[in-house]
Amino acid sequence: MRIRIVDAFTERPFAGNPAGVVLLDTDSFPDDGRLQQVAAEVNLAETAFAHPLPRAAEADWALRWFTPVTEAPMCGHATLATAHVLKTTGTATGTVRFATLSGVLSATADDDGSITLDFPTASLTALPVSQKTAEVAGALGADIVSAHHAGPHIDDLLIELADEKSVRALAPDLAALQRISHRGIIVTAAAEDPTRGYDFVSRMFAPAVGIDEDPVTGSAHTALAPYWSARFGRDELTGLQASARTGLVRTALRGDRTLLTGGAVTVIDGELLA
């Protein structure tokens, strides 16, 4: 089994979010236990597995994503990484359609070398002050400006903090976050200086699915895009995910769809021998 490691949402290696990518030459997936074993061995936030579909199918490739401990219903950076491998190996060009647990998602190779994903826009539901928001604030160690639930394809809490410095300074209690019954906690704030090339910052913590902090989270930006677009009155924005690796996600809100654009770099190409 050939495995590539691709850094997604970055133009340079050792930044962005690394994803494992496995292109299968079969017409079906191995059993779930095998996929989970491989993802655990790769031990990145997500590993993507894809196999080609018949020409008459509604999509070109079937695609699944696994964290080290469970299957993910949606993953942006591993989808971008898979599209990058398809493009750079000459396996596919132009727009590729993926059949996934979240419906058909597409990825388009852009002229500038970046890739644009077409994902469903998350719906946001404001959360009142409650025991849950108090638990989140306590786990984050920060005061919350607002809290929303993001769904249905993701199950995250979107938390706004007072400013960019507060987001960058977070050192949350991960054990406490893990006890909160959601996929992850997206923490965000407006950019301190928008002239630096981004409009908002974010960080993503998902210990409940085996990811203490995700370096750059494409799917989270399907919630961040509508949230900040409503605030700024603009449909096209750029988000900086302020993890240690950092990464940029360009977003374009198109009603019930969100376009996510970024670069990718293949850093490892090898074989699983077991």
Image (cartoon, rainbow, N blue to C red):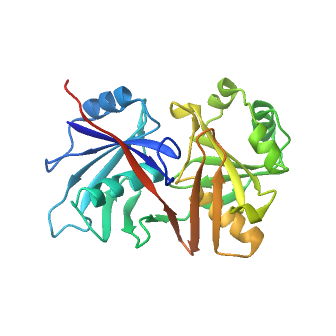
Measuring 26% from the left and 35% from the top, which residue is drawn there?
270
Q: Residue at point 44% right, 64% down?
A: 114
Task: Please state the horizontal and vertical placement of residue 56, each as a whole percent of the image.
Answer: 16, 70
Residue 32 is left or right of residue 120, and the answer is left
Image x and y of residue 175, in percent: 65, 24
Give the residue at x 65% y 68%. 237
- Kindly tell me whether residue 99 is visible in this rendering: yes
State the image coordinates of residue 119 (x, y, percent, origin top left): 47, 64
Front-lying residue, 231 or 82: 82
Most foreground residue, 181 or 225: 225
Query: Is 47 placed above or below 173 here?
Result: below
Instruction: Tell which of 107 and 209 is nearer to you.
Output: 107
Q: Dividing the image into 4 quarters, which one contains the C terminus? A: top left
- Number of labelled discs? 0
Residue 266 at what x, y percent from top left? 37, 47
Q: Quadrant of the N terminus?
A: top left
Q: Quadrant of residue 42?
A: top left
Is residue 96 found left or right of 172 in the rendered image? left
- From the viewer's perspective, tell me whether residue 180 is left or right of residue 111: right
| Residue 74 visible, this angle | no
**Furthest-front residue in this view:** 12
Q: Residue at x 21, y 60 (%)?
A: 91
